[in-house]
């Protein structure tokens, strides 16, 4: 299910029944690292849990990276097609924290490629809402940026 405009009320019932994980992506190119993180997010909350995926807007991506090739709509459709993803939402900032504060997941999935400062800030926010951060190892051989460079150089 894709939700471009969501409200915290949509998630309150979910939290009473099941755990929620939140992870976020550009998803311009899907690679094994993305899939492993998504599978882990779902496995952590279990079959009855909900794995919510945030897809960054073009503006959010351009806070730190180049504009993506695929449109937001296309990237959200890709995420929705992945079996272990229960809900896809728009993420308006590079930081997941605005969505996290609204959704209040039990688990925020982070990549070890993100700065320690950003991960610590996420830990503080998650602690304040009764959740926690799980940091998954970065898969350097599965970098979207490196894959794009390889394609351009061929």
Image (tube, grey):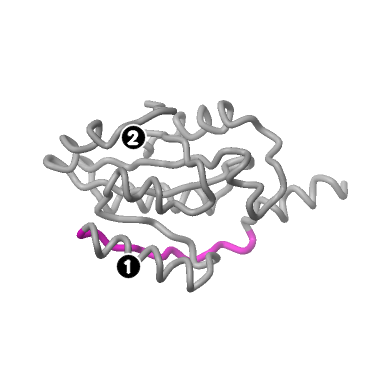
Label 2 Cα neighbours within 10 Å, binned few <14 / some 14-19 / many ≥20:
some
| The magenta stretch spans residue 38 | no
The secondary element bearing badge 1 is classed as helix
Relative to 52, say whether 71 is above or below.
above
Q: Mark 2 or mark 1: which is in front?
A: 1
> On the picture, is 1 further left or further right than 57?
left
Q: Residue at x 57, y 42 (%)?
A: 27
Identify the residue shown where x is 53% and y is 69%.
115
Measured from the top left, where is residue 137 in percent x and y? Answer: 48, 66
| Place of residue 20 in the rendered image (x, y in percent of width and height, measured from the top left) | 26, 46
Q: Earlier in the sequence, mark 2 or mark 1?
A: 2
- Residue 119 drawn at (x, y percent): 43, 67
Residue 137 falls inside the magenta stretch? yes
Q: How many marks?
A: 2
Q: Nearer the viewer, residue 38 or 55?
A: 55
Q: Residue at x 53, y 31 (%)?
A: 78
Q: Dot 1 corresponds to which residue? A: 124
Residue 86, label in figure: 2
Figure quadrant of residue 72: top right
Marking on residue 79: none
Numbered disc 2: secondary structure: loop
Q: Nearer the viewer, residue 70 or 47?
A: 70
- Seen from this angle, which residue lies furthest right? 154
* Residue appearing at x 51%, y 49% in the figure: 34
In the shown orientation, is residue 145 left or right of residue 4?
Answer: right
Give residue 116's position: percent from left, percent from top: 48, 73
């Amino acid at each position: 299910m894709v939700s471009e405009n969501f409200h915290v009320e949509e998630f309150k019932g979910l939290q009473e029944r099941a755990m929620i994980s939140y992870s976020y992506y550009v998803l311009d190119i899907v690679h094994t690292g993305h899939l492993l993180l998504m599978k882990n997010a779902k496995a952590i909350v279990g079959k009855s849990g909900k794995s919510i995926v945030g897809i960054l807007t073009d503006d959010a991506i351009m806070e730190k990276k180049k504009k993506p090739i695929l449109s937001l709509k296309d990237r959200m459709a890709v995420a929705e097609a992945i079996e272990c993803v229960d809900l896809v939402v728009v993420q308006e900032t590079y930081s997941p924290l605005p969505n996290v504060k609204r959704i209040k997941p039990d688990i925020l999935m982070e990549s070890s490629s993100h700065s320690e400062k950003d991960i610590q800030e996420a830990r503080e926010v998650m602690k304040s809402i009764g959740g926690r951060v799980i940091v998954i190892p970065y898969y350097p051989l599965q970098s979207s940026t490196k894959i794009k460079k390889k394609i351009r150089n061929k």
